[in-house]
Amino acid sequence: MNMKQIFLCAINNILSGSCKEDCKFCTQSVRYKADIDRYTFKSIDTIVSEAKQAKALGALGYCLVTAGKGLDDKKTEFVSSVAVAIKKEVEGLNLIACNGTASKEQLSYLKAHGVDSYNHNLETSQNYYKEICTTHSWQERYQTCEDAKSVGLTLCSGGIFGMGESREDRDELLKAIASLEPESTPLNFYHPNSALPIKSNTLSQEEAIEIISTARNLLGEERMLMMAGGRELLFGGDESKMFDAGANAIVIGNYLTTSGENPSKDHQMLSDLGYEVASSCGA
Ligand code: SF4
């Protein structure tokens, strides 16, 4: 892989903000009443048109996210229909579904309808997980990741840093992610929201750099290491440091419930740093 190339990925929140789980970092949990947009199934025409815009901005990966603990029949059918519609109208997008806990049957169904990859994050270490979520288990998350791979989907799995976890927890999380051998790993840096139980991000930029380089060492050179939510908080204006540490992908545009950098600013930043936007996943 040519490290002078940076891969872009975009996210679409196609069903937002209606989750009953208690993940303490998540504005989409209804328990915390965060001030975000909440809607049920977005129209497929809107999603296809947003996918076209993302492709035009250079995105190679396009992630279809639904709020909630996991898939049910209705969501599986919806995500599958969205995948079929995007594959018909937009060429060259790697489609990633991010829909929580899923069975092998549901994952196979998504794959049969054009989904290429499944994103499911381990979020934090197995040990610290009980501090951030009590309504479902870390093991269940790990199992879904294994099941996604077992049905032939590529795996995208990462986590969130800066939620009060220790350095050991960070190392344990990165080791657990590496044990799954994911194709792609998003690193999120916790974005504080006053409605959430976790009030601040406990991470320094130096610690974030250490996390990126540890992740790169554990994952090897060939994998995609993506800077996702919270990138602007830790590296706004200092992006070269995250690429020097081993990152080779960024999320472009908005995140699930927080605004990202303006895409044209990101393109300018990459060009100023001497990076090209990757034009194919096999590059
Ligand atoms: S299960 Fe997913 S959508 Fe629900 S609160 Fe947790 S992270 Fe948020």
Image: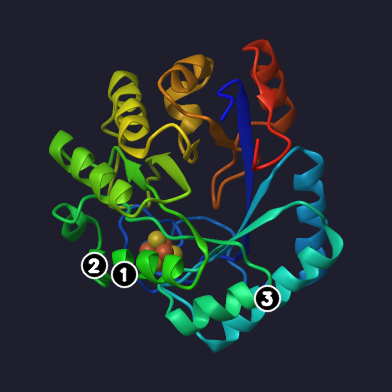
The reply to whether the C-beta atoms of the residues labelled 2 and 1 are less than 8 Å apart is: yes
Position of the N terminus, as image quadrant, is: top right
Report which residue position mark 3 lands on. Answer: 113
Q: Residue at x 41, y 41 (%)?
A: 188
Q: CA distance from mark 2 to mark 1?
A: 6 Å
Dots 1, 3 in contact, CB < 8 A: no
- Residue at the spot of label 2: 139
Examine the image and state in which quarter residue 65 appears.
bottom right
Q: Look at 75% across and 62% down and name the residue there.
A: 47
Q: How far is disc 1 from disc 3 in space, using C-alphas?
A: 22 Å
Of mark 1 and mark 3, the one earlier in the sequence is 3
Q: Residue at image x 45%, y 68%?
A: 148
Q: Is residue 162 left or right of residue 227?
A: left
Label of residue 105 in the image:
none
What residue is disc 1 on? Answer: 143
Looking at marks 2 and 3 on the same chain, the residue that comes earlier in the sequence is marked by: 3
Where is 277 relative to 53, above or below? above
Q: Amino acid at mark 1?
A: Gln
Disc 3 crowd rating (10 Å Cα; few below 14, some 14-19, many 20+) is some
Return the x and y of residue 206 as percentages of the image width and height.
30, 18
Q: Amino acid at mark 3?
A: His
Frontmost of labels 2 and 3 is 3
Q: Is residue 157 left or right of residue 139?
A: right
